[in-house]
Image (cartoon, rainbow, N blue to C red):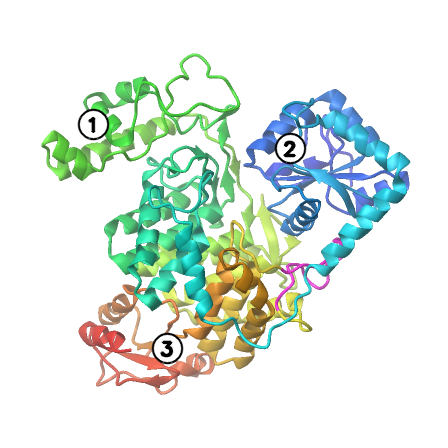
Amino acid sequence: MSSPPKGKNRLAFETSPYLLQHAANPVDWYPWGEAAFAKAKAENKPILVSIGYSSCHWCHVMEHESFENEDIAKLMNELFVCVKVDREERPDVDEIYMTALHMMGQQGGWPLNMFLTPDGRPFFGGTYFPPETRYGRMGWPELLKSVAEIWRTRREDVGTQAGDLTEALQQMSSYAAADALPDAELFQRASDQTSSRYDSTYGGFAGAPKFPPHETLEFLLRRYARSGNRRELEIVDHTLKAMARGGIYDQLGGGFHRYSVDEKWLIPHFEKMLYDNAQLARTYVAAYQLTRDPFHARIAREVLDYVLREMTGPKGGFYSATDADSEGREGKYFVWTKGEVESLLGDDAALFSRAYGVTEEGNFEDPHHPPEPGEKGMNVLHVVYTADEIAMQEKLTPEEVAKRLERARHTLLKARSKRVPPGLDDKVLTSWNGLMIGALAYGGRVLDEPRYVEAAERAADFILRDMRTNDGRLLRTWRDGQAKIPAFLEDYAFLTDALLDLYEASFELQRLQQAKDLAAEMNRLFADDREGGWFHTASDATDLLARVKTPTDAATPSANAVAAQVMIRLGALTGDSTATARAERTLRMFHDATDRYPSATMGLLIALDLLLHQDGEIAIVGDPRKESTQALLKTVNAKFLPGTLLALRHPSGGGEEENLIPLLKGKTLVGGAEAAYVCENYACQAPVTTPADLEKALAAR
């Protein structure tokens, strides 16, 4: 590698926005790789690996306080080989060392700062450290000196600690498979546990801070579809409405912030993540299917439109995140004073302020900076009163109020667009794009929005074209024309799942074939053929201490859970019993984990639900461009059918459809009319040709 430009370190050659943020630090940062380990071994120095991501607030704080400080940087360079890692590019590195931190008895978080032996074994670590000791937390320079002294004088103890942690990491992915699948009573137990944590006042679960509970809401919707227990639906409905009316939702531009610092969903941490908005959009669509409440459809559309407007690259891939800060201030881009609102909205200001909680006192202060002149009384917009409620108070028509509020939102959004925006992390990640492709495909077919399906198609084509090696291997990340890093399990699983969603939205047979091919590659690279399940890293990965596989969900679903769901869907759709067997073996392997921690393994419970409640198949025969075929499809798409396969045969199609999808064999038009076949275990009712008869056939299952 050539020398970095003057005033830059080696991170200047990287594409990750997070790593590039640190390229001008006086710290002699290395990217994760062999060069750093070779230097540490040659100089017999410990490695400091610092892990974060571009929209991480405390990562920015520690950079400003310590990594930009010449004296502290000099100390880091003298005592350690310093490595910077973007956890979104390298979730495998992050997972290993975050797990090690937990094994040390510490709470996780980012930035994650871990100290390693020259061969990569962890022996000490922590998260954020201030530049000097305060509030009971050791200062970063003091910690650096202390760790270096331990390395110099207590090398044997360091070796023992590193060895014990490494052994534990290598053993953590060994699971003993149970003889049977988890019992179906687990669903009710998980539902009861979830209900017991439900916040009946503000929605969501437990106390503050509150993160959007993606997988839990998805699980409860499926439970309601099986049980008919209204409480399960009420929990989801209340939570979704509370979030969308709170400050965690961007009331002007759409899209959800990452989490709320309070129990009311009022004050967000202002970064926006692609994975949150993908999962939440899908959940609002599913809630709309079950409730037919247009509120849920509106929020889903607003979220998807926000992503298409602000988070989509010119080639169709979706960007990763936007920052919480702008101009060095948390939330500055999103908050408003009452004076700003009045000057921009004129006669509509009072109405808008009442609806969205704008007051002279405000409800927000940047917790890390005292307010500057003119920054007092900042307001996070949230829905205090709906248009209907305002109409009753003001003796106006709801239509008039809604029109005025819409006009006011447009005015403020236009004014906001002239502010300095938060930083954009414009890298494209395969796994997160998979989540968004699936959400757009699902939302497009349910909400009858072809443009969403078209956007999903374009993103899928971009990844399958531009994010692969010459020999077809999938890659993890893309930015500025450069794709790199071999993809991980979550990349394969999430993208394959999305391609199955795309097939059900477009009925392009190539999508199903692409999903089948990717699943085969996923099994070849990641499957644990000895114990079951899938490792998170490929079999040819060589730069980590251990290959791990975990059952638990985090901000995104467990990769093993989604891989199992993919196998169940593919097995049922293509008739491949070996795919279904892989999923079943995975669920038996994680039997104890799901039994002991159901609330942490909702993704696996959803996979179990798919396996135990395969709710039959629906085959449509017709040209999808024809209105009569679309009428049948709309009848199906209006319903929440989580375990039902949907396939389509074109009347003029060849044998390729039948070969790939056994369900379609022998399915024909009926008297020249488009037809729907409602089946169970491939045994079908008499075909129907009208939406009304299809409604009856679906109800009779």
Q: CA distance from mark 1 to mark 2?
A: 43 Å
Q: Left or right of 135: which side holds 654?
A: left
Locate residue 567, reporting x and y percent: 52, 71
Residue 465 in the magenta stretch? The answer is: no
Magenta-drawn stretch contains 539: yes
**Residue type for callout 3:** Gly
Q: Is residue 119 visible?
A: no
**Which is closer to the viewer, label 3 or label 2?**
2
Q: Which residues are magenta?
A: 533-549
Query: Which of the two discs, 1 and 2, sits closer to the camera?
Result: 2
What residue is shown with label 2? 128
**Residue at the top extreme, as displayed:** 373
Residue topped by disc 3: 616
The residue type indicated by label 2 comes to: Tyr
Residue 74 placed where, x, y %? 78, 25
Distance from Cα at disc 1 to Cα at disc 3: 51 Å
Tag 1 residue: 351
